Image (cartoon, rainbow, N blue to C red):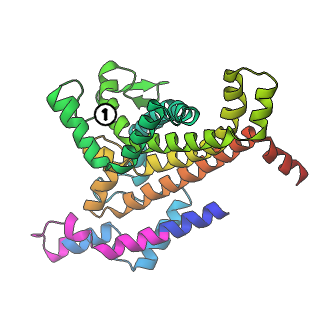
Amino acid sequence: MQSVVVLFVMSLLVFVGVYAIGNPIDILINPQADQIDRERAIAALGLDKPLWEQYLVFLKGALTGDLGRSFVHATPALGLILTRMPATMELAIAAMLIAVVLGIPLGLWAGLKPNGVAGRTIMAGSILGFSLPTFWVGLMLIMVFSVMLGWLPSNGRGPTMLLFGLVPVSFLSWEGLSHLVLPATNLALFKLALLIRLTRAGTRESLLQDYVKFARAKGLSNARVIGVHVLRNIMIPIVTVIGLEFGSVIAFAIVTESVFAWPGMGKLLIDSINLLDRPVIVAYLLVIVTLFIVINLVVDVLYSALDPRVRLAEAKG
């Protein structure tokens, strides 16, 4: 029920907000068109009705899965978004994999040896990851690896292949993978820095706990103490952050998709905002909010699986 309320409030705010910032008719209709053609186009788009009636029409359609038709493309807005979703999901998953695969080991290393050269270097690098703007990093990556070295392509998604015969992906070919490397790295940088600092802080805190001291007193190997007692406990908050940050990666991949001309939902949103394509904007945000809700549910389930105290509290309840 909370999710339904969130979806309703968000759709209302976006609908009113897009209505307030301009009239799509001024963009979509040729200025040379006469008044009759102009009124016909307004009626065809349903913009001749008052705002509250337009919103009620939208809600009625949304209950049946119809989020309206794009003003620009004259196709269902939801279908248009779903055709772009595989590209955004591929980019977001690749970015999170880079952040997780590098961030957790580097953060663990920095936490175990905080005063070493490597530990200090890792933390200095994480500060850069937080500080550098995403668009600037993307432009620098293009200039170095595409323009100067010529190793990787600077834009586009490259050729795609069907995964399981359904989903078009680019990482199944070397050329497609080469197109994925730069935008995924750019998108992963901030999340990588976040996971490094979170893992380091959790490691430093866990090493001071009694259960770690007791495990060492029992004569357990250092690898077992770190792998079982330290890593397992710090993974509880890390999994939560990974889930929430994955949602934000999907939602805020707009800058990266724009810089690298990646044909995902974010680029579609920017184009739709420029043309005031209201159905696409509202449908995009509804899809993003729904993804956040689903991701939060998955995080809650994983949290319960990792933390026995949560399961115990549920059993008592």
* Residue sitting at the far right: 316
Q: Quadrant of the C terminus?
A: bottom right
Q: Residues within 10 Å of mark 1 (few under 14, many from 20)?
A: many
**Does the image show residue 16?**
yes
Residue 300 to residue 156: above or below = below
Picture residue at 80% right of the left edge, 41% below the top: 308
- Magenta: main secondary structure equals helix
Q: Position of residue 226 (x, y in %)?
A: 67, 28
**Of 166 and 61, the residue lying toward us:** 166
Q: In the rendered view, does 306 fall on the left or right side of 290?
A: right
Residue 136 to residue 31: above or below = above
Q: In the rendered view, does 226 fall on the left or right side of 133?
A: right
**Does the image show residue 261?**
no
Q: Which residue is tagged 1?
A: 182
**Of 197 and 147, the residue lying toward us:** 197
Q: In the rendered view, does 74 fall on the left or right side of 94?
A: left
Q: What amino acid is labelled 1 in the image?
A: Leu
Q: Quadrant of the N terminus?
A: bottom right
**Of 23 and 244, the residue lying toward us:** 244
Please report the bounds of the magenta region as a residue range.
12-37
- Is 7 a magenta residue? no
Picture residue at 44% right of the left edge, 33% below the top: 94
Question: What kind of element bears circle 1?
Answer: helix
